[in-house]
Amino acid sequence: MYYEVFLRQSSVEPCLLFHEGGHWRELIVRTNRQGHTMAIVTFHPQGLSQEELCVQKVTLKDFFTKGPGAVCGLTSLYFQESTMTRCSHQQSPYQLLFGESHIFEELLGLKIRISPDAFFQINTAGAEMLYRTIGELSGVNSESTLLDICCGTGVIGLSLARHASQVHGIELVEQAVEDARWTAAFNGVTNCEFHAGRAETILPQLLKSSKDERLIAVANPARAGLRKEEGHLGCSPCVV
């Protein structure tokens, strides 16, 4: 609602189709059980200069800190310039306009750090039920090595680490891997390793080096699945 108010009073137009011009694009909102709110606004720069971009960033910040949008009580506000439908922090860095750099969530006894570029389930209670079910279906135990493929912030592997011998998480988004490593260190989880890169590249290396006979793979892409590369078939979200 308040983003709509902002768009209506902005000096530049929204961007619906890139080739038709405009600038303001989508607003992503993240919340947690504590009521903290992170907002991420993407903006198509089109032909604006850096000075003109700065004006728009200040306008956005002022609206949500001093203007009508202040009622939202945002914990943090991020701004990303993007000429693509979706791009990562590495392709176009998220710029923190004000507030905290991360949002945190409590899940299954863990404190989870979440960056603007990292995937995290939007229904925390539902995610807890899902991860418990994964643990039951997989039968993970002290003799198991758990492979958490497309792991996001690493919560599946981290929540099951106390039952496993070793956990390896694989994730393409580097901010998510940094979050997973922070979460492991903060919560004292020492048997997890997180790897940044394509699962199709990293997974064969892990399989070759693994000494455990009992491997459990959790594929949780919630996207298109693993590609058919190097002889490895694609997969849907599943426990193997």
Image (tube, rainbow, N blue to C red):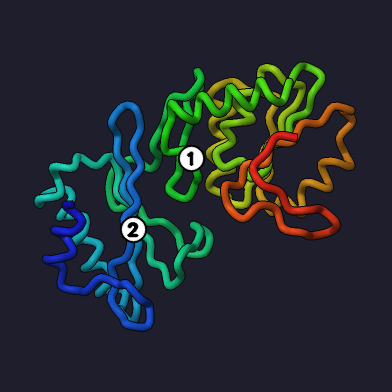
Q: Residue at x 79, y 24 (%)?
A: 144
How many tags in the picture?
Answer: 2
* Residue 54 vertical position relative to residue 195 in the rendered view, above or below: below
The label shown at residue 120 is 1
Quarter of the image with the C terminus is: top right
The mark that comes first in sequence, 2 or 1, is 2
Image location of residue 154, percent across then percent down: 59, 35
Image location of residue 31, percent across then percent down: 33, 37
Q: Residues within 10 Å of mark 1 (few under 14, many from 20)?
A: many
Could you tell me how far apart the alpha carbons at marks 2 and 1 are, in whole angstroms?
A: 19 Å
Q: Residue at x 33, y 60 (%)?
A: 26
Image location of residue 188, percent across then percent down: 59, 20
Mark 2 lies on residue: 79
Question: Label 1 is placed on what type of residue?
Answer: Phe
Task: Between residue 151 and residue 218, name the one nearer to us.
Answer: 218
Residue 195: quarter of image: top right
Please indicate whether residue 217 sits to the left or right of residue 113 in the image.
Answer: right
Please indicate whether residue 8 sits to the left or right of residue 171 in the image.
Answer: left
Please tell me whether mark 2 or mark 1 is closer to you in this view. 1
Task: Between residue 69 and residue 237, name the one nearer to us.
Answer: 237
Q: Are marks 2 and 1 in contact (CB under 8 Å)?
A: no
Q: Residues within 10 Å of mark 2 (few under 14, many from 20)?
A: many
- Circle 1 SS class: loop
- Circle 2 SS class: strand
The label shown at residue 30 is none
* Residue 112 vertical position relative to residue 52 in the rendered view, above or below: above
Question: Label 2 is placed on what type of residue?
Answer: Phe
* Residue 204 vertical position relative to residue 14 in the rendered view, above or below: above
Image location of residue 32, percent across then percent down: 35, 32
Q: Residue at x 42, y 29 (%)?
A: 105
Q: Residue at x 81, y 41 (%)?
A: 206
Task: Between residue 226 and residue 174, name the one nearer to us.
Answer: 226
